[in-house]
Amino acid sequence: MSRLLSEQEYRKTRAFKIKRWYRGEKDAYIGNIEMKPQSPFHEDIETAKQRTHDEAMLRRAIYDIEHNKKLAVFSKLYKVVSVLFVFALIGILLYIVSYLPPTGNAANPDNNEVAAKYIEDGMKDTGAVNIVTGMILDYRAFDTLGESNVLFVATCTVFMLLRIDTKSKKREAEENDRVYEPKNDIILQKVAFFLVPMIIIFGIYVILNGHLSPGGGFSGGAIIGSGLILYVNAFGFKKIERFFTQKTYKWICFTALLFYCLAKTYSFYCGAHHLETGIPLGTPGAILSSGLILPLNICVGLVVACTMYAFYAMFRKGGF
Amino acid sequence: MDFVQNVPFFSILLSLGSGVLTSIMSKKIARMWNTFVLIAITVMSAALFVYMLDVREPFIFMMGHFPAPWGNEIRAGVLEAGMALFFCIIMLLSMKGGQKHIDEEVEEAKINLFYIMINLLLSSLLALIYTNDLFTAYVFVEINTISACGLIMITQHGRTIEAAMRYMIMSALGSGLLLMGLCILYDITGHLLMSNIKASVAYVYAQGTYNVPLIASIGMICVGLAIKSALYPFHTWLPDAYGYSTVSSAAILSSLVSKGYIFLLIKIFFRVVGFDIVVDSKIVNIFFVFGLLGMIMGSVNAILEMDIRRMVAFSSVAQIGYIYMGFGLGTTFGVIASIFHILSHAVTKSLLFIASVGLTDASNNSRDFEDLTGSGYRNPVAGIAFTIGACSMVGIPMFSGFISKLLFAQAAVQNSIFKLLPTLICLAISTVLNAIYFMKTVIRIYTPASAVRYGYLKHAVGKDVKAYPVYTLALVLLILLNMVLGCCSQPIVNWISSGLGMFG
């Protein structure tokens, strides 16, 4: 063979590797990706005993349909009545809908001075090109303040239910994380490597342009949250904990909501007393415009993103 | 604008903000901050109440720079200010009365979450009281529901999680119906602001074009709120939720959360739809029937119950029945009686819950009737408080329960014979049934325990039953409040009727 390279050097070249891969002699993923077949479900004897005992107890004490005639009748009746109820409700609602004003009719009661002012004066009053954002964050900001607190209280309730506080249980949960899927999936990691920055940047764009184009805090926050969830799926909790831990979550939520509360307290107070807030509205269409709407959008976006990620982490392993 | 008119807005935002603040506080500071917020809002509401009694003219507070149909607004009158004051007092006393149990039963790491829930619950109750906008009301109904759910399951064992689950499902159904009702109402009136809806509804009703959706939306709103406040056939979530959660949660849930929804319903009756149209729609008759059923069935279930906390919980079903029966009478005086009963029941039920937990503490934490024998001697304060609460529930003069029964009877007498007779008969039956289960308990706790059992209990309880000054103080204040409602009822009734007059 007339070769410029020796056999050993040739083996190091990319051409050889590609050729080998093409022939199917070597699987590129061996050694790089954890390839763990699913292990069959194991249950130690104690828990199995406990489980069968519980099930038997449940059947005997509560769902003893063979001996408890009342319960048997009830459970059958329940199914029938619930189906009847649902159909009755559907029927009633459809009947009502047929009496409602037709959609898109100009003479409908909801095409009144309220909607007209939002459309005509929205840009002048709030400085936001996107009327919807102007409506939820300026005209009716009190409702949105309540709505972002709904998210906050919902995460608190999920925390209450799912958060694991004892150290041993927490370690167990961490070890059991990803029992059923391989770690370091290269395909997922490579895809996430390209996608996550784009998703997060897109989310930031949607939040920052909330007052200019469709979108805003809620939708942008949801996009960022899904980016974070993709990241944690690809790279695991260890990597994400370098920049996003429970502490970060707590402080981000705290700062965003507190800023929201304080800013709105100030603006409500000024509004009710007919004082000027001193916050410039700017030129509509510019990125730095529309007064408080931009910072509030950022706050809402942060809260929503954190909430989305916190829900995922809670259900996944009971903590961050 | 007078400075005191900032109170509604400031108290809502203070409690909302302190919910957020509590998330980073340590356990001890969170507790102190919560007490501070409750006291501060109580004081502010008292100032507002005094001011309103003087001015006797409702005022509107703009939430933001835009006037009402476009922006949000809140509205306060005598009734709202008084309700806010009363709710804050009851909440403060319930928290303080159950403080020891909160510290013991709630996990160390989760106690912050508990105070977050309490703060947000307070803000949502205040917002429900003051709001003049239906959508704002809906948003705060959501906060109210979720935080009430959190309060139920803060002590985590199977029972509370099951109870929270049931509560969540029933509440979700209620919220769904409420939201659909509001949507239909918006579709046919084009407004979310309460006063504007009332004008449009009167117009629409006179025209008769949208009568079917109008009646349906009233029905859906009423049923949704009735589910959330546990009117009789929808009461199944109640006994577990009140019976197994920590005592402060139970007291707050029974005396405030369900009352918040009822207050919203009154508001919808008077300020959104107009009481004439509600009476005309015959929905009040449905309330009347189920209210009467609830009065009887709640008491029957309470008699059958052998667990003191669940017994008190079932008694709530009966009392909610009274309130809806008052709406069902279809007269303004009936609604006044119902509002008085809201106050009376709130003050009595929190007293009973807190007293009953003192009795169970003195009986080795057993809630069984057998073990409660003689507990009135082992924990004298709780025994006396329970007896007074029971007297009030049964309707002994001097206490608030008597006045509300009297008012209901008066309201019934003004009605036609078809509502007069059932009301009076059911009132009588319900009073007897109340007396059966409450007097049974009072006799039980004052029967001296046999020497063997007493020795065993004393050994088991040990030195745990010492008087906690805060607990005693909370009970004494609740008893005093009860006596005030029972002895000086006339000014309070006057206040309610003038408040209701400036409601619409």
Image (cartoon, coloured by chain):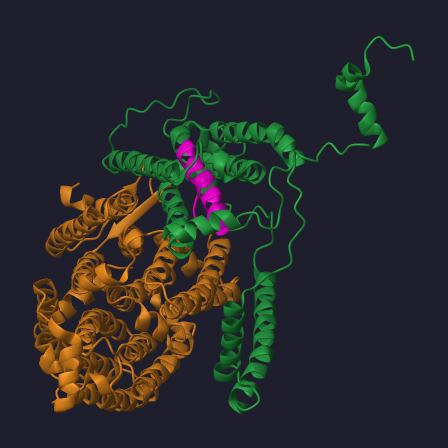
- Residue extent of the magenta highlight: A297-320
Query: What is the number of callouts on the image?
Result: 0
Residue at the far right: name it.
A1
Residue at the far top: name it.
A4
In the rendered image, residue A170 lying in the magenta stretch gets the answer no
Rendered image quadrant of residue B317: bottom left
Q: Quadrant of the C terminus of chain A?
A: top left
Magenta stretch, overall SS = helix
Rendered image quadrant of residue B449: bottom left
**Residue sitting nearer the eye, A203 or A104:** A203
Vertical placement of residue A279 versus A114, above or below: above
Colour orange belongs to chain: B
Residue B29, position as x, y percentages in the image: 19, 46
What residue lies at 78% left-to-right and 19% top-to-bottom?
A: A11
Q: Quadrant of the N terminus of chain A?
A: top right
In the rendered image, residue A311 lying in the magenta stretch gets the answer yes
Vertical placement of residue B118 versus B347, above or below: above
**Residue sitting nearer the eye, B304 or B422:** B304
What residue lies at 48% left-to-right and 61% top-to-bottom?
A: B176
Question: Quick check: B91 left or right of B323?
Answer: left
Question: Quick check: A27 left or right of B356?
Answer: right
